[in-house]
Image (cartoon, grey):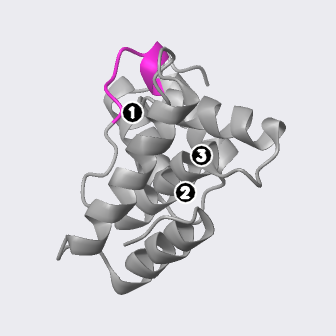
Amino acid sequence: MSDQTKDSTRVAAGLKAAIHNPNVSEEAKQQAAQRLQHMGESVEHGSGSEGNSHVLGGFKATLSNPRTSQEAKKHAQEVLEAAGIAGRHPDASDDEHLTRVVAGYKAALSNPRVSEEAKQHARDYLKEANVDV
């Protein structure tokens, strides 16, 4: 049965559910987001789905991780763009980008809404980057 004979509201609801389901692969989530965009539907991210925002946050971290391959960085950028999240600003120099990343990790350390696990990740990143906290 084609999408044209199905109730488009129900199809969109199913695709949105797939995006927020932690048991759905990232590739399937990306495909669901693309279908929603093609249908003219907005793709909501982070609407109470903490697991999804953590996954997307991991892709954002991948972009600035010096130990990550260029292939992995390209994939992370594609996933973030499909999710409607801008990654690194195209006009930002490497120094500007690093400054922003470090500032974000430092801000996380003093944010009471950030989990202790995320704060430890920030500390680890800053230590590896030789940044005083």
Is residue 87 visible in the rendered image? The answer is no
Q: Which residue corresponds to mark 2?
A: 58
Q: What kind of residue is marked 1?
A: Ala
Residue 131, position as x, y percentages in the image: 48, 64
Q: What kind of residue is marked 2?
A: Gly
Q: Is residue 119 above or below residue 45?
A: below
Q: What kind of residue is marked 3?
A: Ser
Q: Is residue 99 left or right of residue 69?
A: left
Task: Give the alpha-carbon distance from disc 1 to disc 3, as whole Å.
Answer: 33 Å
Q: Nearer the viewer, residue 5 or 99?
A: 99
- Tell me whether the residue at label 2 lies in contact with that at label 3, contact meaning CB atoms closer than 8 angstroms: no
Q: Return the mark for residue 64.
A: 3
Membership of 41 in magenta stretch: yes
- Magenta segment range? 36-43
Query: Could you classify mark 1 by the number of other residues whose Cα lies within 10 Å: few (under 14), some (14-19), or many (20 or more)?
Result: many
Q: Is residue 69 left or right of residue 59?
A: right
- Tell me how many marks there are: 3
Q: Return the mark for residue 12.
A: 1
User: Secondary structure beneath disc 2?
Assistant: helix
Residue drawn at the location 59% of the way across and 20% of the way down:
2
Membership of 5 in magenta stretch: no
Query: Could you classify mark 2 by the number of other residues whose Cα lies within 10 Å: few (under 14), some (14-19), or many (20 or more)?
Result: few
Q: Quadrant of residue 63?
A: top right
